[in-house]
Image: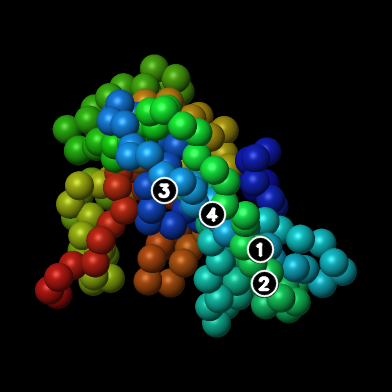
Amino acid sequence: MRVTSRLLASTLFVLATAAPGLCQASGVAAPASDNVAVPTRVFLVLAGGAKVEAEEVSERPEGFWYRRGNVWAVLDRSRVTRVERVEPVKKAAPTASAVPDPAPARWSLSEAARVESFFVKRFGRPLPVTAYGQSGLHTRWGYDHRRSMDVGLHPDSAEGRALMAFLSSEGIPFLGFRSAVPGIASAPHIHVGHPSRRLTSR
């Protein structure tokens, strides 16, 4: 399968992080400041000179994981020559303007019925839930999955794209895995809910 039109074609999965775009403004004004912090721009420089811009990069034994939005991709180490980080110039903040302070996206398993109803109406079949709340596999891997559910859809499939679009429009946090990741994901799927935190005791 191919990645969505917004992302590069490579093995992608969504890391367990809530997407900033899923948050809604709370209407609370931020204090004034002389400068506005601008995120550092990060680029993966590929063999041949091409660059891939990312919001975050993590070097692992299997390659370079990089994040764009709430989606993570991995590039083989042989394809990456170096990582460049460009420090931005601080910009002056506008005066006498209220900046909304985003509130975290809200989600609980009690809202699962809303997601399932959308899928049934759209595709005429039940939502293929593979894990509802905590499962034995999540416990063995040491993740708290009690407030999340996993859906057995590939993020790049037509159904997967439609589901993610619905979740985004409803402000529901989600994570999408394009492939199995040892100790993290057993197969491609869409994780509905906030990031699964590590269990404090196993």
The first of marks 3 and 1 along the sequence is 1
Q: Cβ–Cβ below 8 Å for labels 2 and 3?
A: no
Picture coordinates of residue 54, whole percent (x, y): 61, 57
Left or right: 180 with respect to 156?
left
Q: Which residue is mark 3?
A: 175
Q: What amino acid is found at the position of numbered circle 1 in the picture?
A: Val
Q: Which residue is mark 1?
A: 86
Which residue is painted at 30% across and 26% down in the image?
27
Residue 128 visible in this rendered orientation of the protein: no
Q: CA distance from mark 1 to mark 2?
A: 10 Å
Label placed on residue 153: none
Q: Is residue 84 above or below residue 6?
A: below
Q: Which residue is mark 4?
A: 39
Determine the residue located farthest toward the left in the rendered image: 201
Query: Judging from the image, what secondary structure is the residue with disc 1 in?
Result: strand
Q: CA distance from mark 2 to mark 3?
A: 25 Å
Choose mark 3 or mark 4, whichever is in front.
4
Front-most of 5 and 189? 5
Picture coordinates of residue 107, whole percent (x, y): 24, 37
Label placed on residue 83: 2
Around disc 1, counting alpha carbons within 10 Å, would you say few (fewer than 14), some (14 to 19), or many (20 or more)?
Answer: few
Front-most of 58 and 124? 58
Which residue is painted at 31% across and 53% down in the image?
195
Query: Judging from the image, what secondary structure is the residue with disc 3 in?
Result: strand
The first of marks 2 and 4 along the sequence is 4
The first of marks 3 and 4 along the sequence is 4
